[in-house]
Amino acid sequence: MHITMKRFFIGASLFLLGLSTIQAQKKSELIEQNQELKFKLDSISKMVSTSQRNEKLADQRSDEYQSQVTELQDANATLMKNLNSFAALSSQNSENINKTMAALERKEKQLKGVTDAVASNDSTAVVILTNAKQVLGENAKVGVTEGSVVISEKLDFFFTDGVGINPSSESRTWIENVAKVANANPKSVITVASLNITGEMNIALQQATAIASILIKDFGVNGERIVAVGQDGGLRESLQIKFQPDYKAFYDMAKGDAKN
């Protein structure tokens, strides 16, 4: 029995020792597994933390990008507005320039019309002067004053001693030749002026009217072109027939051009 108990105790001791060894081995494995799990947990935590940081950075960048997009959209809207304003202003400027150019073109045509008219008047004066010299002779008293051609003769050539209102028969040839010049230049206006030294303007006017009547009635000069006047000749008596441009028609033309 003693031997049996001893064997029992030995077997129990071996069992307990084995059991203790097994438990020690399991505890070691558990510790190792726990460390491994802890390592994995730390790794996962780091990954989560990194992901969170990246997500936060992504959100920040997204906000920045959105802010930049908004700024670009605002800048683009402002640019489009400015472009539209510039286009409208450019169109207005273009319209104003076109109006100005049209106005300048009209003014240029008006000035050309005036220039052409002045040149035409100067040319007409030369033609009348030439005609008068040809018809009345080189010794005729013909001159140009302020653009007008003036044909003159002594007053007593027409009226005895420069008085009376009935022209002499000798003067009719001279008057006829003046009528030829007048009819050859139908656009000019004619002024018949009697200049005396007595101051009797009524007689001077009657004398000028008598010469004008002969031009009209006897030699076919258009009466609407002729004006008769009496003037104070100062110290010299004479009868003058002045051919001048039709200033009224000229001014009417200029006024008409200015209205257009």
Image (cartoon, rainbow, N blue to C red):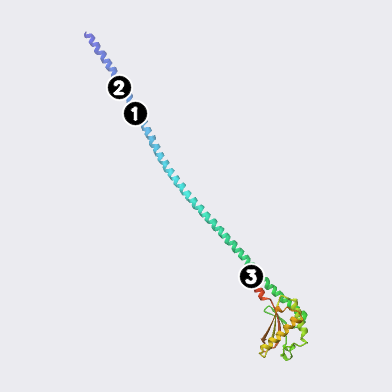
Query: Where's residue 62, x and y in %?
Result: 44, 43
- Spatial CA distance of label 3 from label 1 is 113 Å
Q: Circle 1 is placed at which residue position? A: 35
Specify whether 242 is left or right of 100. Answer: right
35 or 92: which is nearer to us? 92
Earlier along the polypeptide chain: callout 3 or callout 1? 1
Q: How many marks?
A: 3
Provide residue 209's location: percent of width, then percent of height. 71, 84
N-terminal of the pair, mark 2 or mark 1, is 2
Numbered circle sitting on residue 24: 2
**SS category of the residue bearing label 1:** helix
Which secondary structure, mark 3? Answer: helix
Disc 3, disc 1: CB below 8 Å? no
In the displayed structure image, the side of residue 70 where residue 168 appears, left or right: right
Instruction: Using the image, tell me which numbered label, if any, was put on residue 89.
Output: none
Location of residue 185 by image quarter: bottom right
Quadrant location of residue 148?
bottom right
**Considering only vertical position in the picture, is 247 above or below 9?**
below
Q: Nearer the viewer, mark 3 or mark 1?
A: 3
Q: Residue at x 64, y 71 (%)?
A: 254
- Residue carrying label 3: 256
CA distance for labels 3 and 2? 129 Å
- Whichever of labels 3 and 2 marks the residue nearer the N terminus, that label is 2
In the figure, is residue 58 to the left or right of 3? right
Q: Quadrant of the N terminus?
A: top left
- Please name the amino acid that badge 3 sits on: Gly
At a point 56% along the width and 60% down the height, the residue shown is 93
Whether residue 80 is visible: yes
Q: Amino acid at mark 1?
A: Gln
Residue 7: x and y, percent? 25, 11
